[in-house]
Image: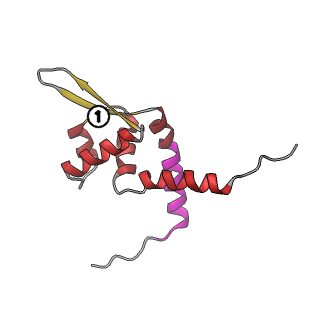
């Protein structure tokens, strides 16, 4: 049986698209934080130390647009908003864990320039 043909250009485009989303600072950490279940905005902010409210808001919107995160508004009072991984986002959790293991084993961090 012959192995399926690999379309390099199609694969490159898919990988480029994935890294255009996952390569942005904080997105991997946000996905990781939501890996244990839905969180409110403030809970995500606490789980991702150092991120500003504005950047977190932007990143959550981008991840929602990419269909990796869902946003649910529960009527109040008070109104509450929670964020959760979609099925596609959940499928990324083990991929990111494997990528982290690979990076730890194969990449040397650049020296800090303080």
Q: Nearer the viewer, residue 57 or 94?
A: 57
Residue 105 placed where, x, y %?
A: 54, 63
Residue 81 placed where, x, y %?
A: 23, 30
Q: Nearer the viewer, residue 97 or 91?
A: 91
Question: What residue range appears in magenta?
Answer: 93-108
Q: Main secondary structure of the magenta part?
A: helix
Q: For mark 1, what is the residue? A: 39
Up the image or down, 34 lies above or below 108; here it is: above
Q: Nearer the viewer, residue 85 or 64?
A: 64
Q: Is residue 95 magenta?
A: yes
Q: Quadrant of the C terminus?
A: bottom left
The residue positioned 33% from the left and 53% from the top of the image is: 26
Residue 14 placed where, x, y %?
A: 56, 50
Q: Is residue 55 left or right of residue 30?
A: left
Q: Secondary structure at mark 1?
A: strand
The residue positioned 54% from the left and 50% from the top of the image is: 98
Classed neighbour count for the residue bearing mark 1: other residues with Cα under 10 Å, few (<14), some (14–19), many (≥20):
some
Up the image or down, 3 lies above or below 103; here it is: above
Residue 96 placed where, x, y %?
A: 48, 49
Q: Quadrant of the N terminus?
A: top right
Q: Is residue 41 magenta?
A: no
The residue positioned 31% from the left and 79% from the top of the image is: 113
Q: Is residue 92 left or right of residue 52?
A: right
Count of number-bearing discs? 1
The residue positioned 37% from the left and 50% from the top of the image is: 27
């Amino acid at each position: 049986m012959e192995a399926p043909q690999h379309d390099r250009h199609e694969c490159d485009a898919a990988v480029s698209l994935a890294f255009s989303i996952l390569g942005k600072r904080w997105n991997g950490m946000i996905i990781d934080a939501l890996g244990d279940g839905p969180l409110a905005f403030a809970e995500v902010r606490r789980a991702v130390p150092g991120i500003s409210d504005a950047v977190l808001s932007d990143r959550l919107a981008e991840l929602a647009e990419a269909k990796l995160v869902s946003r649910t508004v529960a009527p109040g009072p008070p109104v509450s908003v929670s964020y959760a991984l979609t099925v596609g986002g959940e499928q990324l959790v083990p991929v990111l864990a494997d990528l982290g293991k690979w990076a730890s084993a194969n990449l040397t961090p650049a020296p800090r320039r303080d």
